Structures are given as C-alpha cells and as structure tokens.
Amino acid sequence: AQSVTQLDSQVPVFEEAPVELRCNYSSSVSVYLFWYVQYPNQGLQLLLKYLSGSTLVKGINGFEAEFNKSQTSFHLRKPSVHISDTAEYFCAVSDLVSNTGKLIFGQGTTLQVKP
Amino acid sequence: DAGVTQSPTHLIKTRGQQVTLRCSPKSGHDTVSWYQQALGQGPQFIFQYYEEEERQRGNFPDRFSGHQFPNYSSELNVNALWLGDSALYLCASSVRRGHEQYFGPGTRLTVT
C-alpha cells in the first residue's frame, strides 16, 4: 500500500519570495508522482508529474519538483511566488504495478501568499 | 475542448435519502474515477469505471455505487446518506485507466 505525507499543513510566505512545499511518500513498489493545485471552490488542476527520466520536473505557472528516490520525496518549489498562487496544494502517487491510475493523495498544504 | 463537467454544483440532502451525481469526461477520455474530499482533507478514491464496469474500488461501503454509460459518462449513487457523507465529490477522467487524470469542478454535497 502507498501513503503520502505532506509535512506542512500551512505555509505562509511573502510575495516574490521562494517557497518549498514538502512531500514524502511510502510505497513498496515504484510509483508515479503528481502535484495538484486546488483554488477555492474549484476542482484539482495538474501542476506537474514525474513518470520517469529526469528527476527535476517542470510544470505550469513556474513550479518545479524534484524526485528523490533515496529519500522518497517529491518536494515542490517556486523561486518567486505571486498572490495568485494562494491555494491548496496536493501531492499524490499512483503505483506502476497495478497500473490503474488510482491516486493516493496527501492531506494538502495551504500556501498563503502575503503582499 | 470541453473539460470534465459535473452536475449538480451543489446539493443538500437529508439523512437517509439517496443521491445521484453525474460526470461527463473530457473529450477523448474513456475512464472515470470518483473521489470524495472531506473538508480539510485530501481526496480519497471511491471507485473507477472503464468499459462500463467497475474496475477498482477504494475503502467505501456498498452504499456507494456507480454506473458508466456507453458515451463514457458516469453516475455516482449514494444510498442511506449519513452526515459523514457531506463532502466535495470529484470526478476525474483519463484514457485507458491512465495515470494522468483531469478533474472536474466537483459537486458539493451537504447532508443535514
């Protein structure tokens, strides 16, 4: 079975500052990794995904994430945040073995960007 | 290109009632997965439909059932509603049970 832990429930940051949202996962098999963003009263939007290849993944809106297999982590970063980045961010995994696309999500991290 | 659509947007039901939620997948997608997102929590997988059959199920009771139609749209039915069923219900679509899933805006269900 897989599980996902998002290490920070809330991350306050000032506009134009860098930010890192931390995600660790547990799995006995290889996984695909995802970050989703959820704006208030909306569904989930895919920010980026790691399937294979380069461990540094670039996504939309200037976000990037780095897959670290030895530390089973997939932290999300942005060098300079905007007010519009204020949202809930979810890390998720799906396992390659069952290959069904079922997603296991973390509890979410609220990013609060202050002016 | 229409994305994933869900209806209704909001719904209020009373304990013990039954509810049906609807989802139309993104154009070109043939797989629909349903998730429940309680307030302040991450989404939890309910089940997945592909080729009009339930292919995988999460840890949800039999009160939760679904259906997929030949046009790939799907319904989620919940019987004998509990207060704890109050949540945002998200539908996600993909191609051939693929890992890249696109989510709809969700249906907010409130059980009183």
Image (tube, helix red, strand yellow):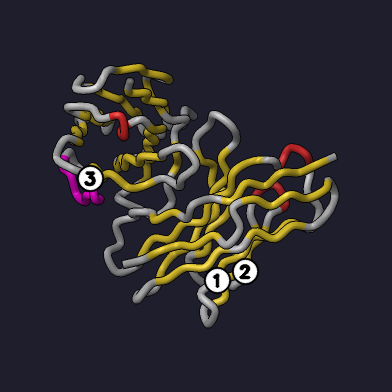
Looking at marks 2 and 1 on the same chain, the residue that comes earlier in the sequence is marked by: 2
For this rendering, which residue is in front, B12 or B72?
B12
Q: Amino acid at mark 3?
A: Phe
Which secondary structure lies at badge 2? strand
Q: Is residue B27 visible?
A: no
Q: Chain of mark 3?
A: B
Q: Give the Cα distance between marks 3 and 2.
A: 33 Å
Q: Are marks 3 and 2 in contact (CB under 8 Å)?
A: no
Q: Is residue B35 visible?
A: yes
- The residue that mark 1 highlights is A73
- The residue that mark 3 highlights is B60
Residue at (78%, 50%) from the top-left corner? A13
Does the magenta portion include B58?
A: yes
Q: Chain of mark 2?
A: A
Q: Are marks 2 and 1 in contact (CB under 8 Å)?
A: yes
Q: Which mark is residue A66?
A: 2
Residue B57 at x, y = what percent?
22, 49
**A31 relative to B69 in the view: left or right:** right
**B81 relative to B88 in the view: left or right:** left
* Residue B98 drawn above or below residue B108: below
Residue A8 at x, y = what percent?
61, 58
Span colored in magenta: B53-60
Judge the density around disc 3: few (<14), some (14-19), many (≥20) Cα neighbours within 10 Å: few
Q: Amino acid at mark 1?
A: Ser
Q: Give the Cα distance between marks 2 and 1.
A: 8 Å
Q: Which mark is residue B86?
A: none
Q: Chain of mark 1?
A: A
